[in-house]
Amino acid sequence: MFVPGTWTASTEPWRSINSGSTFSGLWLNTGTTTLDGTYIQMFAPQQTSNPGGMRLVSNSPGATGNGFNFVHHDFTSGSNNSLMDLTNWGHLIVRGGVLDLHSSTYAPGPEQWRAINCGTSDKGLWLNTGTTTSDGTYIQIHAPYETTNPGAMKFVANSPVATGTGFSFVHHDFLSSADNSLMDLDNWGHLRVKGALLELYSTALGTEQWRAINCASTDKGLWVNTGTTTTDGTYIQMHAPGEANPGAMEFVSNSAGATGTGFKFLHHDFGSTIPDNKLMEVDNWGHLRVNGALLELYSTALGTEQWRAINCASTNKGLWVNTGTTTTDGTYIQMHAPVEPTNPGGIDFVSQGNSGMGFTFSHYHGTLTNDMRIYNSGKVAIGKNIIAAGSVPEGYLLYVEKGILTEHVRVASHGTTSWADFVFNKGYNLMSLDKVEEYIKKNKHLPEIPSAAEVAKDGIDLAEIDAKLLQKIEELTLHVIEQQKRIESLEKQAKK
């Protein structure tokens, strides 16, 4: 033991101990044991416990003790310059602006780890594998009072964009030396969570939480939920191709049925104080409200063809559903608003082309059945058989299969010449009864009246057949009048 003469051995000793039997090293202590002094202990390499190690132990009070101070003393000026402190709480305080941690494997230049606190520029903390922002991977923590990017934190990888991993989060098991990859964020911005659960909690809301779950055993897809089950939260569920409801996606709101909004689609302008712009709503009753003037539904498979529903507040003031973009390149339905100046409250159904089927009205009950069709030529067919035949017979605009039932039928004539009043005109060539009899015997029907075969083939024109029947009645009336005159003449002769 060596005791300096300035101090008494009992109060403040400095001791240098080399105990060959126990420590087999060097022990510098202000006291006599490990409990009553501050000491440095250097273990010999051949020790069984902590071989070759070094221990620096302070003995100051936990709450107030400084721990370790590294000080530079200027013998010229007599001043002390505090360089670094290691407090009793394990805090390392470096008084300068730079902490360099070098890899002994490499030269200090090209491969080094630095933690830099630049008081003049960044005013924060910078952990860098290089010396600048371009030659290393780094973490930069900006101070709150910085002029640019205050209070922000940057994590910057410097690996090749095409092949670089970006950021890997790995758990290392020191017992087995195995690395377990937990999460990757690659250079393309893809986040891959290797476990089955990603939970994002809102600490301000207590029990409320946001979860994104990929359950390999059950859902085999992705589930984003504000709660923990399908009944206590609003969620989005994306089903994997191999599960029940394969490949489907569900959006489920959990608001009150009568009053809940359901789903809102909003645009928020972060660069202004303008309130959120409500774009579209789907309420709990399934009503879709588009707040803009245009709803476009595109068919990507058909290229330029598209389906549009347009509500033009300035022009049409109604609803326009069009397969094209104008009234000439698409088939459309136009519903005019009551306040429109032209066709107020009307509905237009417009098909394109002259040879197409036009409009078909059908019903489905096991199979699709066409009930009525309005052709682009203006012809109308009612009945599945005539529609299946392909067209209305030539010369007609309306065909009703199996007939019609009505209380009144009014047939208009194109003019007075088509009616049979001409029978009573002077000079009308009235066929004699002998010739009528001869015609009937030969043709089995009245003159100028179609036969049964002709009616079966071509049908009858109601206006024309009524006029012909009236003509025959008028001719018969003339014959009766003529016979009445002959009867009266014969009666006069018989009385003489």
Image (cartoon, grey):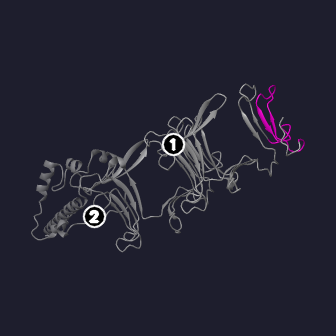
Magenta stretch secondary structure, dominant: loop
Regarding residue 491, the answer to whether it shows in the image is: no
Residue that appears at 17% across and 54% down = 446
Magenta residues (range): 9-38
Q: Of residues 265 and 213, which is closer to you in this image?
A: 213
Residue 469, percent from left and from top: 22, 60
Q: Which residue is mark 2?
A: 411
Residue 228, percent from left and from top: 65, 45
Q: Which residue is mark 1?
A: 109
Name above or below for residue 136 compared with residue 333: above
**The N terminus, quarter of image:** top right
What mark, if any, has residue 260 been given in the picture? none
Q: Earlier in the sequence, mark 1 or mark 2?
A: 1
Inter-mark Cα distance, 1 to 2: 107 Å
Q: Of residues 387 and 234, which is closer to you in this image?
A: 234
Residue that appears at 37% across and 55% down = 307
Residue 276, percent from left and from top: 53, 65
- The amino acid marked with disc number 2 is Val
